[in-house]
Amino acid sequence: MRWLWPGTLFGQLLLIMVSGTLLVQVVSSSIWFDVRFAQVLEAPVRLMAARSAPLIAQAQCHASRPTLPRNYHLRCTEQAPPTVSDEGRGRRRIELLLHQALTAELGHTQNARVLKVQLTDELGQPLLWRSLFGLRTAQAHIRFAVPLGDGHWLTIDGMEMQGWSGESAWVLISDYLLRVYALRIVAVLLACLVAVRLCLRPLRRLADAARGLGNDLKQAPLPLDGPQEVRQAAQAFNAMQQRLIAMVNDKAYFLAAVSHDLRTPLTRMRLRLERLPEGEDKQRLRQNIAQMDDMISQVLDYLRAGEQQNLQSVDLDRLVARQCSELASAEEPLPILGQAGSVQADALMLQRCLQNLLVNALRYASGVSLHLERTASAAYIHVDDHGPGIAPELLATITDPFVRGEASRSQASGGYGLGLSIVQRIASSHGGGLLLVNRADGGLRVSLWLPVGQPL
C-alpha cells in the first residue's frame, strides 16, 4: 500500500485532511441519524395525534365505536399495556412529541405511552436506512396507548405516510452529497493549498540556500522568519554555514603551513645533498626528495582543486588546442574533432584539469584523440584512447583519492592516484562532472562536462 502514499508534502497533507474530514463526517453521522429519524417521523406523529384526538375525546369502551380513519385500529383494555423494554432515544423522542401534539389538540394534558414505532414499505416490511436516505417513501406504523377517565386504556394503532418533500429522492441525495461532502473536500483542498504555500515558502528558501552553499560558501545567511520550526532550521543552517567557513579557513591555514613547513626542510636537504660525493646513495636520496616534493605538490593541488579563484570566459577550443600542441608528439598527434565554445570557469584550474586528463591518457594508453561537443546546457571534452581501459569494478571508485588502476604507486608507473581526483574536484567546483566509460571497441573514454553559463 506504500504506492498510495503521495510523495509531495501537498499530497500527503491533502490525503490526511480529506481522510480525517471523511472520518469525522462518518463518526458524526450517528448524530445526523438521530435527528433525521425524528424528522422523518415528526409529520406522521403530528398527523396521527390530530386524527386520534377526536377518537380519544369520544372514546367510551362500552359504547359504539366511532368511524375510524383508514389504516387505524382501536382496542380498549381494562389494564395498562405492558411497559416497552426498549428505552431507546428514538422511542422516547416520539413519545414526547406525541404527548405534546395530543395536549395541543385536546386542550389539556394527555399522557401517552408509545408501544411501537416502525417504518415499513408498502408490503409492511421494516424499512429504515433507505427511508432515511429518501430512496423509497416509507409508512410510519405507530401504536400507542392513552388512559381514559373511566380507568380503561385506549390503544390506537395506525399508519401514516412518511413526511418528505415532493422532490426526487435522487435530487435530494445529490444535493446532500454535494453540499456535505464535495464542498467540504473542495474547502479542505483550498485550505491545503494555502497552508502548503505558506509553509513551503521558507522550506524552498532553505533548499535553495543549501544548493547554493556548495558554490558560494559566503552567501548571505537565511532570515530567521516563518514558523518556529522553520526558524530553528534556518538558525541551524546558518550555524552550519559559519562552521563550514571556519573549516575552509582552517584548511587554507593548513595548506600554507604544509607548503612552508614541509618544503623548507626539503630545500635544506637538497642543499646538504649537493655537498655529498657522487654515488648511488646520493642518486637514491635525490630521487626520494623529488618524489616527496611531487607528492606534496599533488596533495596541495588536490586540496586547491575545489577552490575557484577567478571565474572568466574561457574558450575551450583554444585551451584544448594549446594543451594538445604542448603535449603532442610524432607518435601521439592528439587530433581534435568538434567544437565546445566558451564557458565561465577558472582558466588556470581548467588548464590543470585538462593537462591531468591528457597526461593520464598518454601515460597509460595510445591512440589518444579528443572530441569536443556542445549542447544547450553543457560543453563536453571527450578524451578517447585505445589502451587497456579500466576494470569495471573500479569505474565507480577510480576518481577517489589515491585509487589507481594498478597497485603500484611509484612515480614511474603513474603517480599517486590523485590525477583523476583533482579533475573530479575541479569539475564539481564548476558545477560539472567527470564520466569514465570503457569503449566497446577497446580503450577508455573520459568525458569532462561543464555547464554553459555561470556555474551551478
Image (spheres, rainbow, N blue to C red):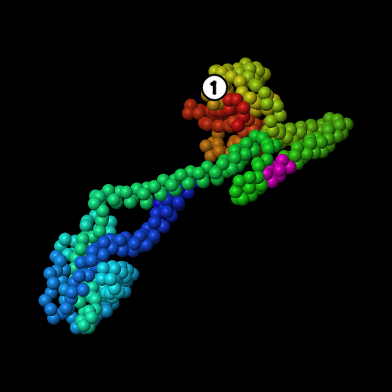
The residue that disc 1 covers is 373
Q: Is residue 317 above or below residue 78?
A: above
x, y (%) of residue 173?
Answer: 29, 51
> How many neighbours does mark 1 have within 10 angstroms: few (below 14), some (14-19), or many (20 or more)?
some
Q: Residue at x 74, y 33 (%)?
A: 297
x, y (%) of residue 163?
Answer: 25, 59
Q: Is residue 252 visible?
A: yes
Front residue of 224 and 236:
224
Give the residues drawn in magenta, as a range. 238-247
Q: Is residue 125 left or right of residue 95?
A: left
Q: Is residue 334 visible?
A: no
Q: Residue at x 15, y 79 (%)?
A: 61
Residue 447: quarter of image = top right
Three-letter amino acid code at the position of disc 1: Glu
Q: Is residue 316 above or below residue 203?
A: above
Q: Is residue 279 left or right of residue 188?
A: right
Q: Residue at x 17, y 64 (%)?
A: 124
x, y (%) of residue 384?
Answer: 55, 25
Residue 276: quarter of image = top right
Q: Is residue 59 left or right of residue 96?
A: left
Overall secondary structure of the magenta stretch? helix
x, y (%) of residue 125?
Answer: 18, 64
Residue 28: quarter of image = bottom left
Front residue of 25 and 365:
25
Residue lying furthest right:
275
Q: Residue at x 75, y 37 (%)?
A: 252
Look at the image and say whether residue 164 sits in the magenta stretch: no
